[in-house]
Amino acid sequence: MNSATGRSRGLRARASGAGVPVAALAGAAWLLAACGSPSPGATGSPALHRALAYAQCMRTHGEPDWPDPASNGAFSAGQIDLNAPAFATASNACQQLAGSASFQLSEAQEQQILNAALRAARCMRAHGITAYPDPGLQDIEANAANIGWRTSLAGTGITRAEVESPFFQAASKACGMGGGSS
């Protein structure tokens, strides 16, 4: 709950852009069988069924206290340690089930992600990408496929060709970002 505004912050990933990978759904049927799926008599939306399957998979792969989703398929991640090795392992194992499930982060988690994003932006500038912008809270995204940030490079003068260059990619890797931004 955002104490300043009195409202929850449910965040979803933006569908377009390159950089932070979003899990593909190929192989989901195999993972549903491996990780479990909702009972045949269960009712609810397809999004809820997918979120329940994701929750079961997370529990099976090292997050035994993973919460059930709300009726809209969103997870409250306030009690989850997003930096724990168990979270990373389970998240990787279950990425094919991620679908469009979203997380509702606590303010502390949002701040933690923002701080990491700001460190990465400073790192990118230190590695020669001088126009790399500082991200803001609007750049934080939290869904079952990705918890992190996506910084828009629009208006910075950084072109797609530069983002795809070995120089940018090396800086991105050195800064722990993997493959750039959108």
Image: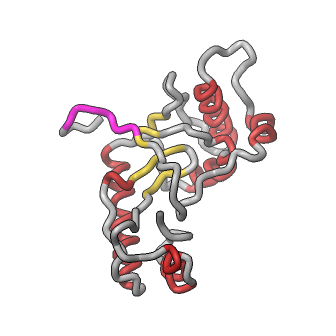
Q: In the picture provided, is 144 more to the left or to the right than 14?
A: right
The mark tally for this picture is: 0
Say above or below: 28 vs 38: below
From which residue to which does the magenta span run? 5-10
Q: Which residue is drawn at the image coordinates 56% and 77% (left, top)?
A: 164
State the residue lying farthest toward the left. 4
26 vs 73, nearest the viewer: 26
Q: Residue at x 39, y 42 (%)?
A: 105
**Residue depicted at x 35% and y 50%:** 110
Residue in the picture at 37% in, 72% down? 121
Magenta: main secondary structure equals loop
Return the x and y of residue 101 as percentages of the image width and height.
Answer: 55, 37
Q: Is residue 143 left or right of residue 58?
A: left
Residue 33 on the magenta segment: no
Q: Is residue 78 visible?
A: no
Magenta residue check for 8? yes
User: Vertically, is 28 above or below 163?
Assistant: above
122 in relation to 22, above or below: below
Q: Where is residue 140 in the image (x, y as percent from the top left)?
A: 39, 53
